[in-house]
């Protein structure tokens, strides 16, 4: 389940819809657990629905999944997201080499050996090649392979989450770039302009204390440090909103997710 920059490195060259037939059926992976035993680093990224299902299956909170070293937090494409701990294989693999949470397994596991590729309208499925050890796979309808009761509803969630992740990445990038631009301006403007700036923001005494050079360096560092703190706040807000705060397993996931999305976006608007 490695990830590649070019889909042609892993795809069979075709794209599939939910009702297409694809040679993905592994017959229950009988006698094989190679993918679950592999060191796949941080590639099995978990979305909020995965955590909803995993906490239901295990009876553990998200914090308990972290402290039991079954889930880890890691940097993925500039933001922090949870992933399965896979450095020594999946911890949910039982003594019989079978998945102990199979009914509630993560989406990436459910997809395999399929993957998703996103486009402007949504996403398509593709068949990974050279990843699954089972060579005698048979054809199966994509929706049957996924085994998700409300596939259309789940697909809508997947797209909402995908767009939100893009939004979070953009916000982090904008915070960082804005601070870097401000720091760069402070580092390059003339001494006279810097004196004027200090007067406007009420920093005249700081210049008198540390001198122009010292103030210039400290002020640029402040912009960068402030950006780092704001980026951390963005990531903490997202993790708390969608992962740390427990879900009600007696209530509909989609409604809870939509409510959390609304609240999280409201909080993120105040972080600049």
Image (cartoon, rainbow, N blue to C red):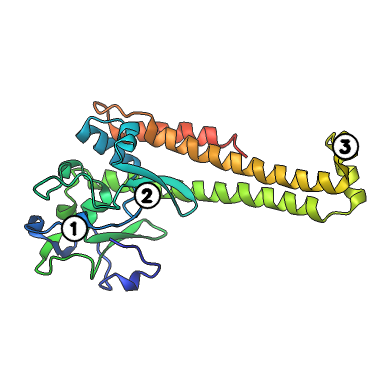
Tell me which corner region of the image, top left, top right, bottom left or bottom right, holds residue 129. Answer: bottom left
Question: Could you say which quadrant of the image residue 242 lies in?
Answer: top left
Viewer-nearest residue: 248 or 141? 248
Q: Which label belongs to residue 28?
A: none
Q: Residue at x 35, y 32 (%)?
A: 63
Q: Residue at x 63, y 40 (%)?
A: 272
Q: Residues within 10 Å of mark 2 (few under 14, many from 20)?
A: some
Instruction: State the separation of the CA atoms marked 3 and 2.
Output: 54 Å
Residue contact between numbered discs 1 and 3, judged by CB atoms under 8 Å: no
Left or right: where does residue 2 sit relative to residue 188? left
- Residue 262: x %, y % from top left: 46, 34
- Residue lying farthest to the right in this orientation: 192
Identify the element where label 1 is drawn. helix
Q: Secondary structure at mark 3?
A: helix
From the viewer's perspective, is the residue at label 1 or at label 3 nearer? 3
Residue that numbered label 3 is attached to: 209
Q: Element type at marker 2?
A: helix
Residue at position x 48%, y 48% from top? 79
Q: Assign the N terminus to one quadrant of the image.
A: bottom left
Q: Quadrant of residue 54?
A: top left
Can you give x and y, in whole percent of width and height, for residue 164 in the image? 45, 46
Q: Is residue 152 above or below residue 138?
A: above
- The residue beneath circle 2 is 159
- Dot label at residue 142: 1
Left or right of 122: which side holds 216? right
Q: Distance from label 1 to label 3 (Cα)?
A: 69 Å
Whole-percent x and y of residue 191?
A: 90, 51
Residue 194 drawn above or below residue 16? above
């Amino acid at each position: 389940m490695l990830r590649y920059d070019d889909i042609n490195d892993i795809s069979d060259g075709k794209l599939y819809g939910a009702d297409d037939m694809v040679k993905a059926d592994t017959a229950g992976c009988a006698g094989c657990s190679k993918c679950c035993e592999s060191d796949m680093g941080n590639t099995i990224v978990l979305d909020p629905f995965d955590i909803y299902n995993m906490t239901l299956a295990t009876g553990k909170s998200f914090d308990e999944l972290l402290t039991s070293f079954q889930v880890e937090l890691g940097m993925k494409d500039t933001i922090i997201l949870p992933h399965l701990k896979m450095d020594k294989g999946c911890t949910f693999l039982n003594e019989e080499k079978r998945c102990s949470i199979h009914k509630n397994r993560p989406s990436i596991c459910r997809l395999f050996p399929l993957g998703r590729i996103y486009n402007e309208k949504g996403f398509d499925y593709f068949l990974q090649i050279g990843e699954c050890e089972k060579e005698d796979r048979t054809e199966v309808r994509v929706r049957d392979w996924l085994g998700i009761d409300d596939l259309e509803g789940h697909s809508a969630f997947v797209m909402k989450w995908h767009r939100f992740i893009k939004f979070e990445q953009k916000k982090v990038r904008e915070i960082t770039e804005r601070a870097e631009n401000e720091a760069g301006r402070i580092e390059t403007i003339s001494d006279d302009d810097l004196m004027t700036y200090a007067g406007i923001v009420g920093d005249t005494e700081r210049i008198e204390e540390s001198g122009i050079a010292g103030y210039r360096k400290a002020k640029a560092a402040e912009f960068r440090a402030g950006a780092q703190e704001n980026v951390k706040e963005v990531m903490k807000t997202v993790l708390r909103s969608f992962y740390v705060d427990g879900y009600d397993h007696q209530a509909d996931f989609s409604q809870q997710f939509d409510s959390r999305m609304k609240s999280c976006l409201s909080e993120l608007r105040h972080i600049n």
